[in-house]
Amino acid sequence: MDGRAQRGARAAAESAPGAGQRWARRWARRTILALALLTVLLAAWASRDESLTWDEPIFIIAGLSYWQTGDHRLNSEAPPFAQQLLALPLLAMDLPRPPYAGPGFRAANQVGFAVDYLATQAEHLNAITQSARAPVWLASGLGVWLAGSWALAMFGPAAAVTAALGVALSPTLMAHGRLATTDMLCTTAMLAASYVLWRTLRSGQWRTWLLYGALVALAVMAKFTALLLGPLAVVQVAYAVLVDKRAPWPLLLRAAASLAMFVLVIGACYGRVLDIRPFIDGLSHLYVNTNSDYHSYLLGAVLDRSAWYYYLATFVLKTPLPALLLLAAAVLGALRHARGREAAVFLLLPALVMMGVSCFDTINVGLRRVLPALPMLAIFSSVVASAPWTPRRRALVASALLWMLAETAWYFPYQLAYISPLAGGPTRAPYVLDDSNIDWGQELPRLARWQAEHARDEPLYLSYFGTIAPSLYGVKATPMTEQHYRNPGPGLYALSTHRLVWLRKIEHFTHAGVDWLTRYQPIARIGYSIYVYRFPQAR
């Protein structure tokens, strides 16, 4: 073989891996996009059978009032942008204006004003619900795409698909990715801002710094949780200076421009220019509607005060075991990976900070409190799918993803009530956790269908956890009274699991004999969050 032929053969051999890598990256991008679209479709499909949850009427109607009046009095403890985004599709509907001149709006009675208005729109309730939820479905799909894209840039094609699947198959992200609340919007905005900062510190371009400032502002305007991005950015910029040896002064100038963009966008969200006083006022109203007498509930025990470890334990209980195994493997192997430290600073650290801050909460509610941590942990976990791609590593990742896929298919569409099978699964959920971890008032349509099929002519007594009227979904029931709780007479009784846990809390403090979870066995479970009991005679 002559020299030219040898050089040609060598060039072909050297280019083959590059071509293979390009093909793998194209395949990964297409797979990520397909998973993102599938996430949107599944969210839309599952949402059809879920009633408005506790917070949704407040966010939707508050956002509508902001568009129509410019008055931010309703739900002032939450920033306006996400609520306006939820209400944006309603502007295209031919709906009558809510009674803004009435006493409910003047008194800023956010719950009463919202549910009273929706009660007058029974024929449009489903259209209002699905329209307001649509932006969240899109944000959920965008979150899957962002997770895969970040993992692709940081770890490679196999990790990209692993990260996208980790986000798409997360039960908690799936559950909140189809509800008209601010949680998923904030989660996706925080993920986008963090990804852009990572890319910005690598490129140093002015326009990406400005984009970062705008994204942080939108994340904060979705939910004040995103304020944590500020101190995290300080640490991440310091890492770029100290470890990556980036020149500090250009970074500081660009960061100042990013801060200016942040202020501009914050003002714009309130309809102001260079005026963030409404933003400061909103911070002063944070947690004003918090119930200081709320008693936490964890692993079946009523807690007299909040537990610092609550969200850590809840994360373990509501995360599939294979996802936990991937995360543990990633933590153990990160330091051996070429970008392990970088991934720890930009992905693991933010998640740990969010978890750490939650340890100081005065009340413990749902895992949605730390929802933005979940996609970052999924991306960080994908490091185990990066090179070297050994048979053992391939088997570990493939088995974990197939396991997660099987669990998702088995419990779909009841992801809100998901509890790890190691803790008994969703059928044991009210014996383990409470509140929006299981029951947020989402099962009224299914209860109405069950009643029509099994108890059309039988009286039903209902104790429901939610703000919307059950009759709007076709449930025909009489509200339960204290006498019913203490001494149920003949008939059917349907109780939200949150109410069952509430009775267990009463039992804990009064020993009144009202712990239905211990005393009685249900004849049916409606989507794991409503338990139905039948009593043939008085007890």
Image (cartoon, rainbow, N blue to C red):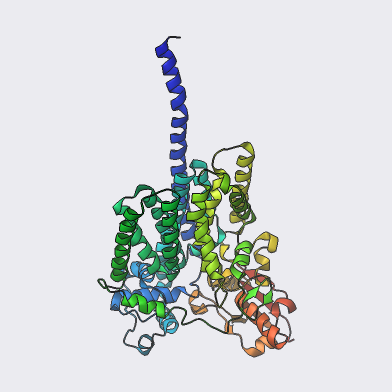
Q: Which residue sits at x=54%, y=77%?
A: 475
Quarter of the picture holding the N terminus? top left
Q: Residue 204 appears at what percent x and percent y? A: 34, 50
Q: Describe residue 198's horizontal placement relative to residue 437 as left or right.
A: left
Seen in the picture, residue 282 relative to 5 is either above or below; the reply is below
Regarding residue 37, the answer to whether it shows in the image is no
Count all numbered tags in the image, as a single digit: 0
Regarding residue 246, the answer to whether it shows in the image is yes
Q: Residue 539 appears at what percent x and percent y? A: 74, 86
Seen in the picture, residue 141 relative to 397 is either above or below; the reply is below
Q: Describe residue 324's horizontal placement relative to residue 48 as left or right.
A: right
The answer to which of 476 and 498 lies nearer the viewer is 498
Seen in the picture, residue 231 relative to 335 is either above or below; the reply is below
Q: Residue 329 appears at what percent x and percent y? A: 62, 49
Please tell me in which quadrant of the rendered image residue 417 appears. bottom right
Q: Describe residue 28's horizontal placement relative to residue 399 as left or right.
A: left
Please tell me in which quadrant of the rendered image residue 210 appears. bottom left
Please tell me in which quadrant of the rendered image residue 410 appears. bottom right
Q: Which residue sits at x=41%, y=12%?
A: 3
The answer to which of 290 and 139 lies nearer the viewer is 290
Q: Residue 312 appears at what percent x and percent y? A: 60, 65
The answer to which of 53 and 73 lies nearer the viewer is 73
The extreme top residue here reads 2
